[in-house]
Each structure stands twice: as structure tokens, then as C-alpha cells.
Image: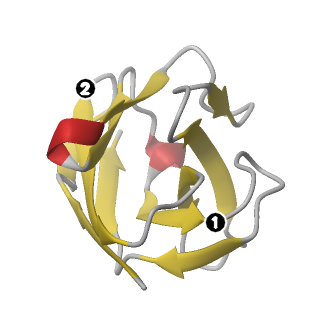
Amino acid sequence: QVHLVESGGGLVQAGDSLTLSCTFSGRTFSGLGWFRQAAGKEREYVAAISRIFGSTDYGDSVKGRFTISRDNAKNTVVLQMNSLKPEDTALYYCAVTMTGWGPGGKYDYWGQGTQVTVSS
């Protein structure tokens, strides 16, 4: 089992920045990803990081604006979100995969999510 807790969501204005954190505990995993789901839309891949080497990957809609990083000593992965847009409004989840990482990983464990709302 892996336990994941997201934090850092909130209400911001367009152009602002926000930092999300995902604190994890339990089994060792291969990769951690951030996903989001806006109301009435399908879940969207945002970013991922490999646990061992720290390799990163981003969805096209957030490249150049979001940065994912990890602090293994603190069991935390951070998603720094800059230049936020109203279309970034969604419930943001972190999840882990036991094999591989990135958008093609099989994410087995999920957090409860944290809401991000960007006003125009």
C-alpha cells in the first residue's frame, strides 16, 4: 500500500503561482505523477517524476509553466505551477506507479485530490 496526501490547492488569479505538494508513505514505487480533472472533463495527465533518477515529463498543456520535483528525504513531490490560467482549474491528484513512470505508467494508488481554482 502507498498512502498519498495532496496539499496546497486554493483560489488564485490568472498569472499567479501555486505550489502543490504530495506527501507519500508506504511501499517503494517507481514513479509519481500529477493528474487533474476539471468538472465535466476527462482526467488529464499533468506531470511525472521517476523516483530513483528524478527524470521528469510534462503534459503539453503545462510545459514551460509547471515544474515537478522531489525530496526523497521528506517523502514529498512538489508541483510548482506558474503563470496559471483559468483552464488550469481542476481537482489535482497525485498517484504512484510500481513499474515504469510517466504518462504510460499504471498508476495504482491515488490521493484524494486538492482543488485549484484560477479566476480570470
Per the image, the residue denoted by label 2 is 16
The structure residue drawn at horizontal position 60% and vertical position 45%, both measured from the top left corner, is: 46
Mark carried by residue 98: 1
Q: For residue 4, say whether it is visible.
A: yes
Tag 2: Cα neighbours inside 10 Å, few (<14), some, or many (≥20)? Answer: some
The structure residue drawn at horizontal position 44% and vertical position 54%, both measured from the top left corner, is: 89
Residue at the far top in the pictured view: 64
In this image, 106 relative to 116: left or right?
right
- Distance from label 2 to label 1 (Cα)? 34 Å
Q: Quadrant of the N terminus?
A: bottom left
**Quarter residue 22 falls in:** bottom left
**Quarter residue 38 falls in:** bottom right
Which is more N-terminal, label 1 or label 2? 2
Q: Quadrant of the C terminus?
A: top left
Q: How is the image coloured?
A: secondary structure
Q: For residue 37, say whether it is visible.
A: no
Coordinates of residue 88 in the picture (x, y in percent): 49, 46
Mark carried by residue 53: none
Coordinates of residue 108 in the picture (x, y in percent): 62, 79
The structure residue drawn at horizontal position 68% and vertical position 59%, both measured from the top left corner, is: 44
| Location of residue 22 with respect to 84 vertically, above or below | below
| Location of residue 30 with respect to 120 vertically, above or below | below
Amino acid identity at mark 1 = Met
Q: Nearer the viewer, residue 46 or 51?
A: 51
Secondary structure category for the residue under label 1: loop
Secondary structure category for the residue under label 2: loop
Front tag of 2 and 1: 1
Amino acid identity at mark 2 = Asp
Tag 1: Cα neighbours inside 10 Å, few (<14), some, or many (≥20)? Answer: some
The structure residue drawn at horizontal position 72% and vertical position 60%, both measured from the top left corner, is: 99
